[in-house]
Amino acid sequence: MLNSQTPQIIMKSLLITTLIGAAALVTATAAEIGQSAPAFEAKDLNGKTVSLSELKDKVVVFEWVNFGCPFVKKHYGSGNMQKLQADYTAKGVVWIAVDSAAKGKEDDQEASKMAKIAKENGDKSTHFILDMDGKIGKAFGAKVTPQMFIVNKEGTLVYSGAIDSKATTNQEDVATADKLFANALDAVLAGKEVVNAKNQPYGCGVKY
C-alpha cells in the first residue's frame, strides 16, 4: 500500500544504494600489493610537477600526513618522521608527503601556508603534495594519517600500512615499537621480499 511518503522513501533507498556502490567502487579500485602503483601527476608545494612515471628506477615512499592529527604529532614531535625522511632520502629514496584534506576540512591549507607549516614541523620530504580533490589518496586507498606506502623501482606497490606497531599518541612509544615501515623499506632497498607487506594502519581518518 502506497502513501504520501513512499516516493521519498524510494528515493532515499536509491540514494543510499548509490552511495554504497560508489564507496565499494573506491575500495575495489584502490591499489593492491603486488600491482602497479596508481599513476598520477601533481604539483608539489614548490610548484614542481611530480609524476610516478618519471620516478622509474627509484624507490618511492608515500606518507599521508595531517599536521593537526595527534598520531602525526607523535612522529613529528619525537623527530621520528623527519629522521626517517632524512635517512632514506640520503639513500636515494624519493619521499612524497601527501595531504588529502578536502577544501574546508581540517588541515585544509593554501599551498603557501602549508609550506610554512611543513617547514615549522621540520618536514624533510622530497615533495609535499596537496591532494585536495582526494584523487591520489583514494587511488592508493589511504585511510588514515600517518599511513605509509612503498613503491619499488619497478613501479609496484610493495607496502601499505602503519609506520610502526604501537597505535598510540605517546612519543615515548616510538623507541620501543616494531618498525614495520622501516623494516619493509630496508627489505626493498636490499632487494628482499617484504614481510607483513599489508597491515592495519593507525591514525586519524583522512578528511576527504
Image (spheres, grey):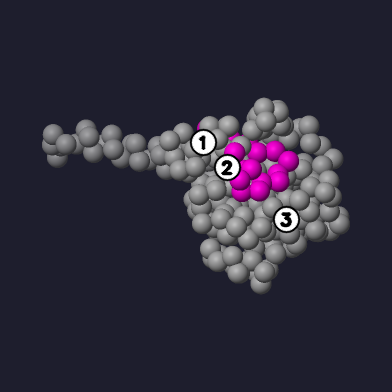
Q: Are marks 2 and 3 in contact (CB under 8 Å)?
A: no
Label 1: how many Cα within 10 Å (few below 14, some 14–19, many 20+)? some
In the image, is 175 to the left or to the right of 14?
A: right
In the picture, the disc for residue 109 is: 1
Q: Is residue 92 above or below residue 55?
A: below
Q: Amino acid at mark 1?
A: Gln
Contact check, label 3 and label 1, Cβ < 8 Å: no
Going from the N terminus, do you reach mark 2 or mark 3 first?
3
Image quarter where the N terminus lies is: top left
Q: Which amino acid, mark 2?
A: Ile
Instruction: Please tell me the numbered disc located at residue 22.
Output: none
Dot 2: element: helix
Residue found 54% across the figure and 47% down from its top: 66
Image quadrant assignment for residue 21: top left
Residue under label 3: 83
Distance of label 3 from label 1 (alpha carbons): 25 Å
